[in-house]
Amino acid sequence: MDIVVLINNLLYCRSPRLVHLDLKGAPPKVGYLKRLFPLIRQMGATGILLEWEDMFPFKGPLSGISASNCYTRHEVLDYHTHCQGQRAGGEYSLHEVLDIIHTDKGSEIEVIPLVQTFGHVEFALKHPEFSRLREVPESPQALCPSLNASMDFVEKIIDQ
């Protein structure tokens, strides 16, 4: 299958056609995303690139990098809270993450998580417990690739 074809002297990207949704800051509600995904598919997209950063409900040693308005562990596991939509913060619960990812089955669209690794990890490196992993000590933008601990950190993020 051709990636780019010429139609009426215009370049047309046949596949893949992705929409990038940046969920940090003011994340849309799960119900909105569930209605949005089929619409995006109808408009010709083949996938959605979801950028989570600190809106992802990290757990364990990474729990501190989730947004300050994150769910408690009890809320994350409480399916009824999720179904009722009773939450004050903008953080996604684990159930909501799974719900978002599984929405793609109904809309025939691929959901691709964008996981920041060595660059654009300010959301994590701004915290004192991870500042030792910075490439430049004064800047929380990038991980230092020569540190073994940086690779461990990346693996932990991906495993979540």
Image (tube, rainbow, N blue to C red):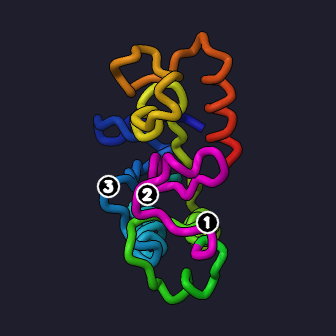
Secondary structure type for disc 3: loop
Q: Which segment is the magenta one?
A: 49-75
> Is tag 2's residue or tag 1's residue first in the polypeptide sequence?
2
Q: Is residue 72 magenta?
A: yes
Please tell me which residue is depicted at 52% across the width and 25% down the height of the picture: 118
Left of 7 or right of it: where is 98? right
The residue identified by callout 1 is 94
Q: Given the image, on which type of amino acid does mark 1 rest?
A: Leu
Q: Given the image, on which type of amino acid does mark 3 rest?
A: Gly
The residue identified by callout 2 is 44
> Is tag 3's residue or tag 2's residue first in the polypeptide sequence?
3
* Whole-percent x, y for residue 39 in the image: 41, 69
Number of marks:
3
Left of 9 or right of it: where is 2? right
Quarter assignment of residue 79: bottom right
| Above or below, comparing residue 133 to residue 157 in the picture | above
Q: Quadrant of the N terminus?
A: top right
Please tell me which residue is depicted at 40% across the width and 17% down the height of the picture: 137
Please tell me which residue is depicted at 38% across the width and 51% down the height of the picture: 22
* Whole-percent x, y for residue 45 in the image: 45, 55
Measure the C-alpha gap from mark 2 to mark 1.
29 Å
Q: Is label 1 in contact with label 3 (beta carbons under 8 Å)?
A: no
